[in-house]
Amino acid sequence: MPPNWSAILRHNVWQYERLDRKQRERLDAWVRVFHAERNWEGCDGLELTDEIRVTIAGQAGLIVLGHEDWYFDRTPSILVYPDDYVARDVARPAGGGLTIVGDESRLGEAWYRGPVILSWPDVLEGGQSSNGGHNLVIHEFAHQLDMIGDPEADGEPPMPDVETAEYWREIVPEEFERLCRACGSGQPTLLDCYGASSPAEFFSVASEVFFQRPAALRVRHPQLYEAFRRFYRLDPEQWLGA
């Protein structure tokens, strides 16, 4: 791997130096494959650099370290904007059976068998620190995991085994309802209330916290942490300690 790539990962994937040697070697190898196989596009005049590509690849690869040969093969392209961007003609429910169609400012999005779209400043914010549990790359690539084999993301990605699936179905839906109740009553929450908007968003929001603030998640939501530990086949608290 080019020496400057290692420097990029150390600077823009804050978990990188906390991985053990074997995990770093696996992530390095993963980044090389992902970097080479994806189509990368800079939008609104953004000039793509190795820093942009390697940073995004490093953060995305972090969440699949526990699985063999998960390379997001159904994600053909990564589109990167120099800031937030405007999605055109977005339909939003307005209540009473009405729908409003208009433009919407976004930081990122993920499409079934389509691109992942990211705002570069927000990529950096989530990569250079724990960022209060927020990480745009982890959020959008968690959606990609959720949509493996199914265009309708439902908050339950393909499980690695039956036991994990059973534990997930016992714990995660109740944790989602718990977040909905807390957000509805104005209680402070570790998980961002955006996760209460749907099971799919809950999975992505909880994935962010699992990798960004694992110790806090284990303390405040131990069963949820265990469900994600079993799914991702990783225990970030051991090698992140934050």
Image (tube, grey):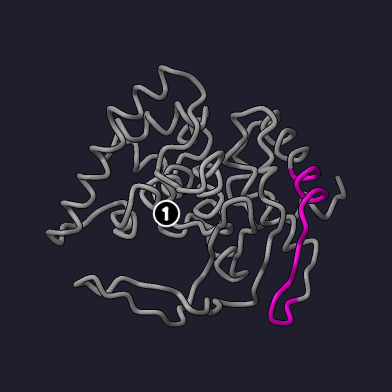
Mark 1 packing: few (<14 Cα in 10 Å), some, or many (20+)?
A: many
Q: Residue furthest right?
A: 2
Q: Which residues are magenta?
A: 31-46
Q: Which residue is outermost to the top?
A: 163
The answer to whether 109 is drawn above or below residue 144 in the figure is: below
> In front here: 204 or 239?
204
Q: Quadrant of residue 33?
A: top right
50 lies left or right of 99: right
Above or below, comparing residue 105 to residue 208 in the picture? below
Who is closer to the viewer here, 137 or 12?
A: 137
Residue 60 screen position, x and y as percent: 62, 48
Left or right, residue 152 beside residue 115? left
Q: Quadrant of residue 122?
A: bottom right
* x 45%, y 57%: residue: 134
Tell me which residue sits at (86%, 44%) in the image: 1
Instruction: Tell me the SS state at disc 1.
Output: helix
Q: Which residue, given by chain and number where applicable, does mark 1 sit on?
A: 133
Instruction: Tell me the quadrant of the picture where the C terminus can be found.
Output: top left
